C-alpha cells in the first residue's frame, strides 16, 4: 500500500426547518390559532391549537386493520402535563404524571362525545385521538381540544363527517349579558350563574355540558342560541382551512348483510320482533329473540359473520322503535310520550350507622345513595395540572354488573363511573349550604342497584333524599330526568320523557336535565346524529321541567325538609376564632402541641389561615379539644378568677399555673392581707390555690393575687403574720419582679 494516498471527506447534514402553516381567528375577544406543523408527522393528522396562552397538541391515528368488535373502536386520551401549569406538581414521592385525574377523564369524555357521532359507526378500524396539554393559563383547554380534534380529523385522511366547533358561555346574575369563553376566574366568580359548554355544526347542537345556579330554561335556550352563533363563526373558519389542507379520505368498505340473511330474518324473526319490543317483558324478551336469531343465522348461513347478523338485528330494532314512536306515538312499555314510569322515594331506614341515605325508584332504575359526614380535614386534596385545592363535596357512583342482570368485574373505576358521579355532583353542588354555616365535608356514594335508563339522574334524586335525611340544610331539593328523541328530520320527530331499554339504546339523543323548583343546575346531552336544532332542544327543556317537578313532588312527600339534627353517629363540628399570630403556638414545633391535643382528646383539629379552628369528634371529643385551645389562646383580663397549682416558689412570691401554657406570679404581698416573713411558710409547690388576675404588665406578664380572689385564704390556711425580720412583702415589686434590697 506504499505510495497510495487516501482522501477523506466530512459529511455535513443539510439544515432542516420545521414546516408550519398558521391560521387565526378572534373568538370572544381572544385570538384562536391553529398551527399545522410536521412536529408529529407520523400521525394521520396533527395540529397545535392556541387560545390565549393555553396551548394543546391534538393528534389522530387510525389503525390499519379491522377490529373484531360489534362497535366502533374510538379512543380519546386527554394527557395532562404538569409542566403545562408551570409548576412542579404531583405526589411528593413521585414528581411526575400518574393515572389521569378525574378532570382529565371528564375532558376526554367531552371530546369523545363531540366527535363520536360524526364517524361512520360501521367503521371497525381503531381510531385514537390524543390531546396533549402543552400550556394552561386562564382559559380552559377543553375548547381548543375539541376544535383541535375537529381540525386534526378533518385535515387527516381518516373518514369523518366534521368539522364541529365548541364554545363556552357564561352569564352574570342579571341573566342578560352572555360571556363568550369566560376564564377560570370568571367561571368561578359568585356572580356567574351559568357554565355552558356547547358543541355543534351547521346550526345544530350535538353536545352540551352545563353547570348552573338554578337558571331558568328560557335563559339556557338563549345562551344556546348565542353559542350557536359563535359556533357557526368557528365553523366557517374551519371549513376554509380544511378546503386548503385536507387530505383525501380513506375509503372504507362496509360489510352489508347478504340477501340471504335479510330473507332469513324476514322469515324467522320479523313478525316476532314487534311483540318482543312492545311487551311487558321488555329487554328480556328482546334478548331471547336475539339469541334465537343468532343461532338460526349461524346454523343456516355459516358463511355470514356473526357480528354482521348481530348488527342487522339491532338495525331492525332501531327502524321499528323510530317508526312506531314518530308515526304512531307508541313506546315499548305503552306509556305516553311525556309519561313518567312509577316513582318511589325513601329517606333513611337503611342502617343507623349511615349518616344519611336515600332510595329512589324510577321504573326499573333503582338507586341507593349513602352519605357520610366528615370534618374539614376529610376534604379531598387536589393537586392536578388544571385544578389545585381542597374539595369538600364528593359524589361517587358505582355501577355493578348485577344491575343489568349480568356477570362481570366488580370494583375499580372507569370513565363512565367518573362521568356519572361528576354529573350528579355538578347537579347537587348549587343546593349545598356554604362552608361558613355548615363546615362538614360531604361524601355521597350512589349505587346503581338496578339499571333501566338514566342511573345518573336517578343518583341526583337518591342523593337529594340522602342529604335531607342527614340533616344537611340544603337550599332546595333537586331532581333529574333523562329525555330521549326519535329523529327523522326537524319536522318528523318525537321527544320521549324518561327513556328506558330500547329507547335509550336506539334513540338519537340522551338529554339529562337536573334542577330544583326554581331552575336548572346541570345539563348533559349526547346525540347519535349530526346535531339537534335548538327549537327541538327548547321543547325538550319544557318536557324535562314538567317531569322534574313531578319527581320533586314525590321527594317532598317522602321528606318535606332536611331533618333538624344530623345523625348521632356523625361527628360533631364546633369552631372558634383565634388571632392568626396565635396559630403557631397552638400547632407547636413540628406539630407537637396540636398532635398532643388530638391524641389526648380523640378530636381532629383543622386550622385555617384566618385563624378559624375547627374541632371534629364524637362523644365530647370536640368540646374537650376546644376547651384546651381556648385556654391556650385566652387573652387574660384583670378581674378574672382561676384556680391552679403552685409550680415554683421564689423568695419574692409563687408562680401559679392558670392555663395549659400560662402562669402568673403571686407576689408574697398578695397572699394575705398582712405581712408574711417567708413564702415557704405560706405555700408549697403543688398547692391548689385561688387567684385573680391583678394586672397584665407592658411585657405581657401576668400578676396574680390570692387575697383578692379569697380574702379568707390566709385564715383558712393558718398563715400567721410575720415578725418583720423575714424576706417578705415590705418591698413590693413592679411587674412581678423584686426590687434590689437596700442596705441600712
Image: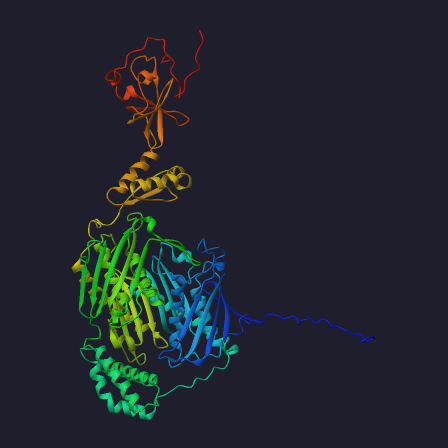
Q: Give the answer, above or below, for where 180 lies relative to 636.
A: below
Q: Position of residue 605 (x, y in %)?
A: 33, 44
Using residue 604 as the reference point, say whether residue 273 is left or right of it: left
Q: Where is residue 707 in the image (x, y as percent from the top left)?
A: 28, 19
The single residue placed furthest to the top in the displayed view is 744
Residue 482 quadrant: bottom left
Using residue 35 as the reference point, say whether residue 267 is left or right of it: left
Total residue callouts: 0
The residue closer to the viewer here, 359 or 684, is 684
Residue 661 quadrant: top left
The residue closer to the viewer here, 677 or 520, is 677
Q: Where is residue 75 in the image (x, y as percent from the top left)?
A: 41, 72
The single residue placed furthest to the left in the displayed view is 557
Q: Give the answer, above or below, for where 572 lies relative to 192.
A: above
Using residue 566 as the reference point, say whether residue 607 is left or right of it: right
The residue closer to the viewer here, 736 or 289, is 289
Residue 415 can be seen in this image: yes
Amino acid at each position: 500500500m506504499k505510495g497510495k494516498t487516501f482522501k477523506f471527506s466530512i459529511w455535513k447534514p443539510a439544515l432542516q426547518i420545521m414546516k408550519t402553516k398558521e391560521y387565526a381567528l378572534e373568538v370572544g375577544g381572544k385570538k384562536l390559532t391553529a398551527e399545522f406543523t410536521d412536529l408529529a408527522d407520523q400521525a394521520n393528522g396533527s395540529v397545535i391549537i392556541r387560545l390565549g396562552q393555553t396551548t394543546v397538541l391534538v393528534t389522530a391515528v387510525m389503525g390499519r386493520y379491522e377490529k373484531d368488535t360489534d362497535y366502533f373502536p374510538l379512543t380519546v386520551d386527554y394527557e395532562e402535563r404538569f409542566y403545562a401549569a408551570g409548576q412542579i406538581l404531583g405526589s411528593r414521592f413521585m414528581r411526575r404524571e400518574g393515572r389521569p385525574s378525574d378532570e382529565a377523564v371528564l375532558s376526554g369524555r367531552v371530546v369523545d362525545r363531540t366527535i363520536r357521532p360524526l364517524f361512520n359507526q360501521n367503521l371497525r378500524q381503531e381510531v385514537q385521538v390524543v390531546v396533549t396539554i402543552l400550556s394552561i393559563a386562564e382559559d380552559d383547554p377543553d375548547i381548543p381540544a375539541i376544535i383541535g380534534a375537529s381540525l386534526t380529523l378533518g385535515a387527516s385522511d381518516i373518514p369523518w363527517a366534521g368539522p364541529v366547533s365548541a364554545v363556552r358561555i357564561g352569564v352574570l346574575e342579571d341573566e342578560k349579558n352572555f360571556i363568550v369563553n369566560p376564564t377560570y376566574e370568571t367561571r368561578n366568580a359568585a356572580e356567574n350563574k351559568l357554565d355552558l359548554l356547547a358543541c355543534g355544526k351547521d346550526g345544530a347542537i350535538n353536545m352540551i355540558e352545563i353547570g348552573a345556579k338554578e337558571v331558568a330554561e328560557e335563559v339556557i335556550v338563549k345562551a344556546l342560541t348565542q353559542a350557536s352563533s359563535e359556533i357557526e363563526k368557528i365553523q366557517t373558519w374551519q371549513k376554509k382551512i380544511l378546503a386548503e389542507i385536507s387530505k383525501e379520505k380513506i375509503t372504507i368498505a362496509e360489510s352489508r348483510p347478504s340477501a340471504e340473511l335479510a330473507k332469513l330474518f324476514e322469515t324467522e324473526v320479523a313478525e316476532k320482533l314487534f311483540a318482543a319490543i312492545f311487551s311487558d317483558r321488555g329487554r328480556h324478551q328482546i334478548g331471547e329473540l336475539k339469541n334465537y336469531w343468532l343461532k338460526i343465522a349461524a346454523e343456516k348461513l355459516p358463511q355470514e359473520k356473526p357480528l354482521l347478523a348481530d348488527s342487522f338485528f339491532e338495525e331492525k330494532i332501531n327502524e321499528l322503535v323510530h317508526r312506531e314512536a314518530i308515526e304512531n306515538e307508541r313506546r315499548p312499555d305503552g306509556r305516553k310520550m311525556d309519561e313518567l314510569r312509577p316513582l318511589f322515594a325513601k329517606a333513611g331506614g337503611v342502617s343507623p350507622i349511615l349518616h344519611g341515605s336515600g332510595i329512589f325508584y324510577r321504573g326499573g332504575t333503582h338507586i341507593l345513595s349513602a352519605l357520610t359526614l366528615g370534618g374539614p380535614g376529610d376534604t379531598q386534596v387536589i393537586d392536578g395540572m388544571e385544578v389545585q385545592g381542597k374539595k369538600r363535596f364528593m359524589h361517587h357512583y358505582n355501577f355493578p354488573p348485577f344491575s343489568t342482570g349480568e356477570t362481570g368485574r366488580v370494583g375499580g373505576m372507569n370513565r363512565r363511573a367518573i362521568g356519572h358521579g361528576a354529573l350528579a355532583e355538578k347537579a347537587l353542588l348549587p343546593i349545598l349550604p356554604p362552608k361558613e354555616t355548615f363546615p362538614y365535608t360531604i361524601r355521597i356514594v350512589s349505587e346503581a342497584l338496578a339499571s333501566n335508563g338514566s342511573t345518573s339522574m336517578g343518583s341526583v334524586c337518591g342523593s337529594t333524599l340522602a342529604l335531607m335525611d342527614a340533616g344537611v340544610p340544603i337550599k332546595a331539593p333537586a331532581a333529574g330526568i333523562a329525555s330521549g328523541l326519535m329523529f327523522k328530520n326537524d319536522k318528523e320527530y318525537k321527544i320521549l320523557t324518561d327513556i328506558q331499554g330500547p329507547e335509550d339504546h336506539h334513540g338519537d339523543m340522551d338529554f339529562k336535565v337536573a334542577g330544583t323548583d326554581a331552575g336548572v343546575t346541570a345539563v348533559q346531552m349526547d346525540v347519535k346524529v349530526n346535531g339537534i336544532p335548538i327549537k327541538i332542544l327548547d321543547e325538550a327543556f319544557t318536557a324535562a321541567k314538567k317531569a322534574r317537578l313531578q319527581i320533586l313532588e314525590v321527594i317532598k312527600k317522602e321528606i318535606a325538609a332536611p331533618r333538624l339534627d344530623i345523625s348521632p353517629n356523625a361527628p360533631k363540628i364546633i369552631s372558634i376564632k383565634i388571632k392568626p399570630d396565635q396559630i403557631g403556638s397552638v400547632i407547636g414545633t413540628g406539630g407537637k402541641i396540636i398532635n398532643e391535643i388530638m391524641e389526648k382528646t380523640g378530636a381532629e383539629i383543622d386550622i385555617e389561615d384566618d385563624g378559624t379552628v375547627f374541632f371534629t369528634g364524637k362523644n365530647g371529643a370536640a368540646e374537650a379539644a376546644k376547651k384546651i385551645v381556648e385556654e391556650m389562646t385566652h387573652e387574660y383580663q384583670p378581674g378574672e378568677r382561676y384556680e391552679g397549682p403552685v409550680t415554683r416558689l421564689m423568695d419574692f412570691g409563687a408562680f401559679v399555673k392558670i392555663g395549659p401554657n400560662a402562669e402568673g406570679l403571686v407576689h408574697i404581698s398578695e397572699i394575705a392581707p398582712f405581712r408574711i416573713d417567708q413564702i415557704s411558710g405560706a405555700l408549697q409547690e403543688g398547692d391548689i390555690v385561688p387567684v385573680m388576675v391583678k394586672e397584665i404588665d407592658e411585657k405581657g406578664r401576668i400578676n396574680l393575687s390570692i387575697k383578692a380572689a379569697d380574702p379568707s385564704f390566709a385564715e383558712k390556711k393558718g398563715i400567721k403574720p410575720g415578725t418583720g425580720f423575714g424576706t417578705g412583702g415590705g418591698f413590693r415589686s413592679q411587674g412581678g419582679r423584686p426590687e434590689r434590697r437596700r442596705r441600712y
